Image (tube, rainbow, N blue to C red):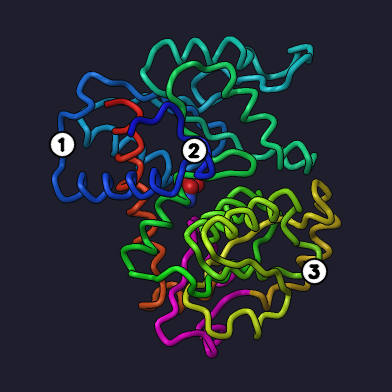
């Protein structure tokens, strides 16, 4: 199997996902340090990163290739992403020139471009990322767009495999507090991944934080395909009862999308949604805590829980490197 783009797990058939995970395992057991010799990966980060940036560069290097990183506006020209605007502000260059130029220097590109966080429908449709993708004819990797984070989801799938977590077990995606609204990309991608893997997915979120209908429609469709199930609730006790996995994630109010004051007024009263060991009282004894990182200690998740054997967050983060090497291999070999 070869890949031309890695933008969304939903673009892959289940057997293609399993093929990528098998390749990741093979490359872990039997490294191929020259597999991508001479190949160049361009990485464009319109937003900050620790894991994605470092693991992409490390993965490319471990396969014998090389990479360059562009963080527009930080040592390079700021890039304008909007269409039809007079460029009389900070941005000296438009993505319509900048992206094709960068693509011409490398064999594959990765782009991180978070949600603008103003227009829910535009962000849910991934309008901005799709417009960028259309400008590039080379292999392309979504490093987190407004509504998707397929590299994270593939790593999380592998982590569940490593932990031998069976399908049809209870996977709770639990909203947790953060000082401000965060994008929907990880919760949307995680719910979809868990449903596609066949879990009984529970989306646990306070009133005002329901995931948008198009996101939930995709999750339901994935569950139908895999034989899993999906429910939504704001009942923390019922949701966590019998859980095998609790995946903590922060996100913004969808009722007050783009309205920091409205969002803030809701989240001000939700600090007790922080997860701690007590939250797992009625979960299965071996229930694990997942989080994509970065995580705010003692805001989203209690420090003692993050430092306990329940937490597999470092395992997840390491698997970013492992699965992305398989993606790079399939795109470039
Ligand atoms: N989980 C994740 O994507 O981490 P970074 O934002 O640090 O890349």
In the visual, does 241 lie left or right of 122?
Answer: left
Give the magenta-colored segment's residue range.
274-299
Reading the image, the residue beneath label 2 is 143
Based on the picture, tell me whether residue 319 belongs to the magenta stretch: no
Q: Residue at x 34, y 53 (%)?
A: 319
The image position of residue 329, as x and y in percent, is 29, 33
Disc 2 within 8 angstroms of ligand 1 (CB): yes
Q: CA distance from mark 2 to mark 3?
A: 30 Å
Magenta run includes residue 283: yes
Q: Please report whichever mark, 3 or 1, sits nearer to the chain's N-terminal start.
A: 1
Give the image location of residue 110, x and y in percent: 46, 30
According to the picture, the residue beneath numbered tag 1 turns out to be 32
Q: Do tag 2 and tag 3 residues touch (Cβ < 8 Å)? A: no
Residue found 39% across the figure and 70% down from its top = 165
Q: Are marks 1 and 2 in contact (CB under 8 Å)?
A: no
Q: Are marks 3 and 1 in contact (CB under 8 Å)?
A: no
Q: Quadrant of the N terminus?
A: top left
SS class of the residue under badge 2? loop
Main secondary structure along the magenta-highlighted residues? loop
Give the image location of residue 330, x and y in percent: 32, 33
């Amino acid at each position: 199997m070869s890949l031309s783009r890695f933008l969304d797990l939903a673009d892959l058939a289940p057997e293609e996902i399993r093929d990528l995970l098998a390749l990741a395992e093979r490359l872990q057991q039997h490294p191929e340090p020259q597999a991508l010799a001479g190949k160049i990966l361009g990485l464009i980060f319109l937003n900050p990163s620790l894991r994605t940036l470092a693991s992409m560069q490390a993965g490319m290097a471990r396969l014998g290739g090389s990479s360059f990183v562009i963080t527009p506006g930080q040592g390079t020209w700021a890039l304008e992403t909007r269409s039809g605007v007079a460029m009389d502000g900070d941005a000296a260059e438009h993505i319509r020139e900048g992206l094709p130029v960068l693509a011409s220097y490398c064999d594959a590109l990765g782009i991180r471009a978070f949600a603008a966080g103003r227009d829910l429908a535009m962000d849910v449709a991934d309008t901005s990322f799709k417009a960028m993708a259309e400008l590039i004819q080379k292999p392309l990797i979504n490093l987190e767009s407004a509504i998707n984070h397929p590299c994270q989801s593939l790593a999380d799938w592998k982590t569940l495999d490593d932990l031998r977590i069976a399908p049809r077990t209870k996977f709770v995606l639990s909203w947790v507090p953060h000082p401000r609204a965060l994008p929907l990309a990880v919760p949307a991608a995680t719910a979809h991944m868990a449903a596609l893997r066949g879990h009984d997915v529970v989306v646990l979120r306070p009133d005002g934080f329901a995931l948008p209908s198009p996101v939930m429609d995709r999750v339901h469709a994935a569950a139908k395909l895999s034989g899993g199930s999906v429910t939504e609730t704001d009942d923390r006790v019922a949701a966590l009862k019998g859980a095998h996995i609790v995946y903590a994630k922060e996100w913004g109010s969808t009722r007050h999308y783009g309205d920091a004051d409205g969002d803030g007024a809701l989240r001000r009263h939700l600090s007790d949604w922080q997860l701690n060991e007590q939250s797992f009282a009625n979960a299965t004894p071996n229930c694990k805590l997942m989080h994509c990182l970065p995580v705010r200690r003692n805001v989203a998740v209690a420090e003692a829980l993050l430092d306990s054997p329940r937490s597999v967050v470092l395992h997840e983060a390491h698997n970013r490197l492992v699965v992305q090497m398989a993606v790079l291999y399939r795109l470039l070999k």
